[in-house]
Amino acid sequence: MTAPETPPPVIVLVRPQLGENIGKAARAMLNFGLTEMRLVAPRDGWPNPDAGPAASGADIVLAGAQLFDSLAEAVADCTHIYATTVRKRGVSKPVLTPEAAAQQVRGTAGRSAYIFGPERSGLETDDVALAHSIVTVPINPEFGSLNLAQAVILLAYEWSKGAALSQPPAVDLDPPAPHGEMEELVQHFVRDLDAAGYFFPPERTDATLRTLRTALTKTGWSCNDIKMMHGIISSLGRNRKFR
Amino acid sequence: MTAPETPPPVIVLVRPQLGENIGKAARAMLNFGLTEMRLVAPRDGWPNPDAGPAASGADIVLAGAQLFDSLAEAVADCTHIYATTVRKRGVSKPVLTPEAAAQQVRGTAGRSAYIFGPERSGLETDDVALAHSIVTVPINPEFGSLNLAQAVILLAYEWSKGAALSQPPAVDLDPPAPHGEMEELVQHFVRDLDAAGYFFPPERTDATLRTLRTALTKTGWSCNDIKMMHGIISSLGRNRKFR
């Protein structure tokens, strides 16, 4: 997932307020394989009894969390520091998306750190000044409301992705029919097959139905295709009387 | 950010348990510009007084949320349905990353839906059977602990991104049958439809046949699917004599 010489980024929570949010951040990290958490002057001290229950089992992250008095000490061994903030600051630094930051982290030989501010106020200008880059999650300009754990999970998620890229093929086809039409086709099949005694033995009916539904769902049939299939089902039902 | 003809995906919560989590999902959605929420049989009814406070201001999403009795009704107008689930299911569907799914959504002319299961148990097999694709967030195999709102935010975040990057989908499916088997299926249809008088008027036969062949060819049906369809054709031909 990452080159062997590139260590995963460190997650640094600067002056976090609630123990519960530290726990949630730990849970968010571990989902995507990040284990190294550093805490700078947490408001309620450390350890914090509220952190564990909120971590939902990510205890390994909390147990290994390191405590520091200042941000500068917390990132002393890091070669590249990313300040996560949604607001424009009076500091001129490159502003990266989580995706671009993750690519840089993977491409750097040294240790990287993602730093996050207190829940209510975010990072101070002095904290941001210490960073090499700013990471901003592009959010709805009319509703930006990411909490700490959500910001952590988005950065961790992006970091965890591999760097392989591809473009989807350009497809230009009749669009698939809306689900309601496909559902009617399934029901038409079921009705007529049931009348024909197809669902036998009865205890296999559910499984057979699921297989049929899966086969029909993956067809990508358009409205016209489905119309044709209705005609086909009806025709086949009239078949034997001509023989 | 998205082609004008591609509507944003609908977020469908299937049998959600806590109102608080519905509110958190709404907040997650609105951060990334998604506003259309649909609820299928929420456990505690709807509206739910716990949803509003948890939405942190995303009231527009909750106010517009639509209520449905069944998943099939909730997605009746959707052309492509993505089931979000972390577990392998006994249903064989393409499995996509959030990134690959987002690209598909942006590349589709119709309406797409992301469906999410109840907090505790996730989607039932029958829910998944209704979907065209499965979306799985690639998480730490030793610690998978995404809650509902986190799953929603990751999918919404990926959708909101530009189309620049993607991971190829990890597909693990029955391969489509070789052409010879598909050809035999086409011939089986033709034989029985011909006997039923389906190809009428005769001068339209070639065009009708071509349409049928195109619809069958794009199904991607496996050998097992084709075997099932042979059985279905035969069954339907026996249909009328039971009536």
Image (cartoon, coloured by chain):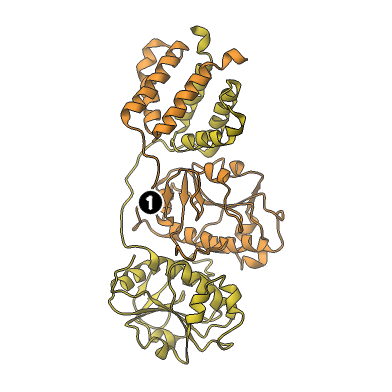
Chain colours: A yellow, B orange
Dot 1: what SS? loop
Q: Is residue B105 left or right of residue A110?
A: right
Q: Residue at x 43, y 66 (%)?
A: A157
- Position in image of residue B46 (x %, y %): 70, 54
On screen, B141 above or below A177?
Answer: below
Q: Looking at the image, which is closer to me, B7 or B136?
A: B136
Q: Residue at x 44, y 67 (%)?
A: A32
Look at the picture and state if B46 lies above or below A99.
above
- Asked whether, in this view, residue B146 is left or right of residue B108, the answer is right
At x 35% / y 27%, what residue is drawn? B181
For the point 36% across and 69% down, the residue is: A102
Horizontal and vertical percent position of residue B241: 58, 12
Residue reaching furthest to the bottom:
A69
Label 1: chain letter: B
Q: Amino acid at mark 1?
A: Ala
Residue A58 percent across, percent down from the top left: 52, 72
Residue that carries the numbered disc 1 in the rendered image: B170
- Residue B4 shows up from this direction: no
How many marks on residues?
Answer: 1
Instruction: Locate residue A137, reporting x and y percent.
Output: 44, 69
- Quarter holding the N terminus of chain A? bottom left
Q: Residues within 10 Å of mark 1 (few under 14, many from 20)?
A: few
Rendered view: A209 above or below A145: above
> Toward the viewer: B30 or A9?
A9
Note whether residue A38 is visible: yes
